[in-house]
Amino acid sequence: MKKMRLGEIADVIAGQSPPSKTYNSTKDGLPFFQGKADFQEKHPKIRMWCNSKKRKEAEPGDILTSVRAPVGSVNLCDRLSIIGRGLSAIRPRSGIHADYLYYFFKMN
């Protein structure tokens, strides 16, 4: 098996904190995931929404990984969403299967 660096097969998108006044529970905007507290077994649970124009987005098929304690937990993004500073999205490049990367990170 050939070893490759993550940057050769995927792009990493760091989350950012949109203004807190843009957070809501009325489904205005996109689902907003902040960290491991939003994670379930495989896909994150929507607890909050955000309507900020200043945002970092995760797309379906991105692997979400927590970058704040506890670091390293992963979920698979199943919808367009906004990610906060506690998460990064790993976006597989063309020809790389998201499920493969997801299970690789989950097991390591």
Image (cartoon, grey):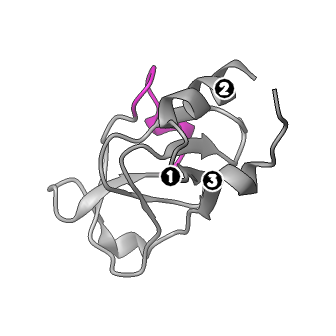
Quarter of the rendering occupied by the C terminus: top right
Q: Amino acid at mark 3?
A: Ala
Circle 3 sits on which residue?
Answer: 10
Horizontal side of residue 97 vs 78, given as left or right: right
Circle 2 sits on which residue?
Answer: 104
User: Can you give x and y, in whole percent of width and height, for residue 68 in the image?
Assistant: 70, 47
Q: Over which residues does the magenta segment extend?
A: 34-43
* Label whose residue precedes the other's in the sequence (3 or 1): 3
Circle 1 sits on which residue?
Answer: 94
Q: Nearer the viewer, residue 97 or 74?
A: 97
* Mark closer to the observer (2, 1): 1
Quarter location, residue 23? bottom left
Looking at the image, do the residues carrying marks 3 and 1 touch, with CB atoms under 8 Å apart? no
Q: Nearer the viewer, residue 44 or 103?
A: 103
Q: Amino acid at mark 2?
A: Phe
Q: Main secondary structure of the magenta part?
A: loop
Above or below 20: residue 38 = above
